[in-house]
Image (tube, helix red, strand yellow):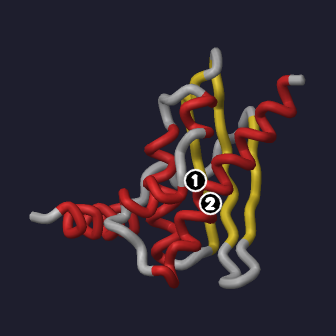
Amino acid sequence: MTRAAEGKEAAMEHYSNPRNQGEIAAPDASASVYNPACGDTMRLMLKVRDGIITDVKWKAQACGASLAAASIASEMVKGKTTAQANGVTREQVAEALGGLLPAKFHSAVLAVDAVKAALQAYTANQR
């Protein structure tokens, strides 16, 4: 199986069986993002202990590609330090989805923007 085929299979798996979907009752940080071009919305919540993301949950009203991107992005940051999570890129999420068509790249953008916004909220809460 080619790398692209594996990525597309992963995208379908994350769409069909999303990881970390739901809510955290008392998150250490949360953020909501919205894409006005397509109407997708996403809320991402974090639990952080000693600088490590111990739990991440998300809720979205979005297209299938954005749901899969949220699932993959949540797995990419869970268990990472906040600095490592902040380094996750749109391109990494898109590649994990098998590469996205230009019309669907907004899905990776939305997921990563949600992660970064939640991390910014966490940093602000720590001050």
Q: Is 83 in front, or is 42?
A: 83
Q: Is residue 26 visible?
A: no
Q: Is residue 106 visible?
A: yes
Query: Which residue: 36% across, 57% down?
Result: 96
Tally of numbered tags = 2
* Image-based side of 125 in relation to 92, left or right: right
Name the disc covering residue 76, or none.
Answer: none
Query: Which residue: 49% across, 49% down?
Result: 20
Query: Which residue: 58% across, 47% down?
Result: 57
Residue 32 location, quadrant: bottom right
Across and down, in percent, residue 98 comes to: 32, 66
Q: Quadrant of the N terminus?
A: bottom left
Q: Quadrant of the C terminus?
A: top right
Q: Which residue is mark 2?
A: 59
Residue 52 location, quadrant: top right
Q: Of the residues under marks 2 and 1, which one precedes in the sequence?
A: 1
Q: Is residue 38 above or below residue 44?
A: below
Q: Is 96 in front, or is 16?
A: 96
| Secondary element at tag 1 | loop
Q: Is 123 in front, or is 99?
A: 99
Across and down, in percent, residue 97 comes to: 37, 64
Packing grade of label 2 (10 A; few <14, some 14-19, many >=20) is some
Q: Amino acid at mark 2?
A: Lys
Q: Is residue 49 above or below residue 83?
A: above
Q: Which residue is mark 1?
A: 22
Packing grade of label 1 (10 A; few <14, some 14-19, many >=20) is some
Q: Amino acid at mark 1?
A: Gly
- Residues marked 2 and 1 touching at CB (< 8 Å): yes
